[in-house]
Every structure is written in structure tokens, then in C-alpha cells.
Image: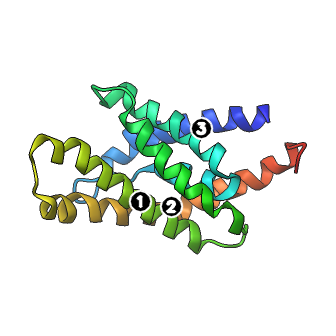
Amino acid sequence: MIIRTIVLILGSFILYVLQTGLFSSFSLAGVVPDLLMILVVSVGFMRGRTKAILTGLLCGFYIDCCYSTVMGVFPLFYVIVGNLAGFSNKIYDEEDHMTPLLLTAVGEFLYNIMYFVVFYLLQGKINLSFYLYRIMIPRVVYTVLVSIILYRIINFGNLFLVRFDKDA
């Protein structure tokens, strides 16, 4: 349990640094893949709702600390997505690679809808079609493409850490 927690904290921080540092240099169509979303959805799929909610809270606070003027918005977004992704834990199979990709796409789409409502719609900017075609769809596609590789790494780490779990 302690080893898994330490690995999760370090892994989420590494993904945050990669997302904001390395991948910002490789932006396609002006968007960057959301590596933290991939982590939250993967944890929800592999470990369940509670672990995904805690992971979403941690990942959201990383984003809040550097980019947000109001604390708590991004953790709320990630917690909602992690909670919904955690429902799929009952169908978890370590050989299934399509379900996490679909969950990542749905989670990223939901995240972007919530982002649009909070940061654009509530400020009177109602041009959804522009946001949909210029930001949302490229970001969902880019995140899903990166999740093909990243999910395999996270799944390998999960299978490795199962050895240290007393309840497994």
C-alpha cells in the first residue's frame, strides 16, 4: 500500500512535468495531450473508484498550483472523471487495451465540456463550435493516441505492484 502510494505520487508528478514541459514542445494543432487524464482513467479502470478519485484529486492539484487562479476547479474535474472511470473496474482485464482507450476518450471529452462550461460559457463566450473543432477534438485525439503507449506502461507498473499488495 505504501509502495503503491509512493509510486503513484512520483509517477503523477513525472507525468505532470512531462505534460507541461516536454509535451508542450510537441503540441499538435496548438494542443497538448493530457497525461494526467490518462493516469486517472487508468487507475480508475485498474484499481477502482476510490483510488481514481484520490488520483484525480492529486493530479488536479498539480494543475491548480501552476495554472489556476481559483483552487479546486481542476481537482473537481479530475475527480468526476476518475469516479466515472472507476465504475469500469468490475470489467478490468489486463489484456484489454480498447476499453481504457475508449474511457480516456470519454473522460477527456467530459473534461473539455466541463472546462468549456466553467471557463468560457460562464464568462459569456458561447462559441462552442470553435472550441469543439479547434481545441476539444484535437485534444481528445492526441490524448487517445498518446494513451496507446502510456496505458501499456501504467498497466505494466500495476501488474508489477500487485506483488507488493497484501490483499491481492
- Give the spatial CA distance, label 1 vs label 2: 6 Å
Residue at numbered disc 1: 143
Q: Which picture quadrant has residue 153?
A: bottom right
x and y percentages locating residue 51 in the rendered image: 65, 44
Quarter assignment of residue 152: bottom right
Label placed on residue 147 = 2
Tell me the amino acid under the disc marked 1.
Thr
Answer with mark 3 or mark 1, whichever residue precedes in sequence.
3
Task: Measure the C-alpha gap from mark 3 to mark 2.
Answer: 20 Å
Assess whether mark 1 and mark 3 are in contact (beta carbons under 8 angstroms): no
* Residue ranking furthest to the right: 166
Residue type of the residue flagged with mark 3: Leu
User: Looking at the image, which is closer to me, 25 or 155?
Assistant: 155
Instruction: Say if mark 1 contacts mark 2, CB within 8 Å.
Output: yes
Alpha carbon separation for disc pair 3 and 1: 21 Å
The residue that disc 3 covers is 54
